[in-house]
Amino acid sequence: MVTYDSLRADHCGHLGYERDTTPHLDALAEEGMSFPRAIAPASRTNPSMAGTLTGEPMVARDRVADPSYSSQHLARHGTLAEELSESGYTTGAFNPNAYASRHYGFDRGFDHFEDFLFSTDWYQEIFQNHLSDSTLYTLIRNFRNYLRREEAFKTWDRYIDQIEEWVTAQSEPFFLWVFSLDTHFPHLTPRGHRKWSSLFQQYYYNWRCNQLIDEMDPDLSQKEIQKIVDIYDDSIRFGDVLLYEL
């Protein structure tokens, strides 16, 4: 099961989009079944994925409250991974989305659950030991993550080798869940996968989007809107390659 965060249906080729953003997804849709009117259980990651993995939507109170309600929801209703595990499947997940991490109970039923939250390096050790509760630590961490696409911004090409290693070690039947953040803001597509945008365009318009993120009616020209669409479409095309690699 592959989940894409923030992927618009109207930007997928098999659903009528004019750009070739999703060639591998389109091929799967042609061979299998596509549900063009499917609607996510919620607008935010945490309740949406809790509903997806249990088949039961979270109630309105839980959707707008503390995301830790998802732990209770997952435990109350049971998850797809738990059902498959009880049926003899080995279960694994690779998921860089912090709002669907083990912290919120999403590891239930998984024999292997990689959420990339606890990897460390010299930078993290120094700043966690001395500045972990400071605003400076938060700013530095967010800026570093933004530039390197680490932790919450980790792209599929940074962990595909781990996925392949896990799959190779398994005997059938097994269930694999991969949660891709490549289509989520910020849209920073690697050089070899850019078709409609440039590196400068990506950094500039991600910065512009960040400025306007809380505005309901941002003042953008048609040219600016198209540039933002360009960087988004490139991120979709890059994310689509994950399906080919899998």
Image (cartoon, helix red, strand yellow):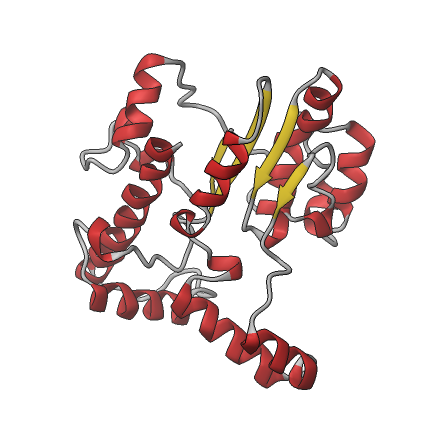
Does residue 207 appear in the picture of this structure?
yes
Residue 244 screen position, x and y as percent: 32, 32
Q: Residue at x 74, y 44 (%)?
A: 105
Residue 171: quadrant of the picture: top right
Q: Residue at x 35, y 43 (%)?
A: 239
For the C terminus, the quadrant is top left
Residue 131 screen position, x and y as percent: 65, 84
Q: Foreground: 120 or 9?
A: 120
Q: State the count of labels.
A: 0
Please determine whether, in this image, residue 136 is positioned above or below residue 146: below
Left or right, 215 with reference to 221? right
Q: Foreground: 40 or 84?
A: 84
Q: Foreground: 64 or 108?
A: 108
Please determine whether, in this image, residue 205 is positioned above or below residue 30: below
Q: Foreground: 109 or 208?
A: 109
Please determine whether, in this image, residue 31 is positioned above or below residue 19: above
Residue 1 screen position, x and y as percent: 51, 28
Residue 7: quadrant of the picture: top left
Q: Residue at x 81, y 35 (%)?
A: 75
Q: Residue at x 30, y 33 (%)?
A: 12
Does residue 61 appear in the picture of this structure?
no
Residue 118 screen position, x and y as percent: 64, 60
Please determine whether, in this image, residue 76 is positioned above or below residue 118: above
Left or right, 132 with reference to 215? right
Left or right, 120 with reference to 19? right
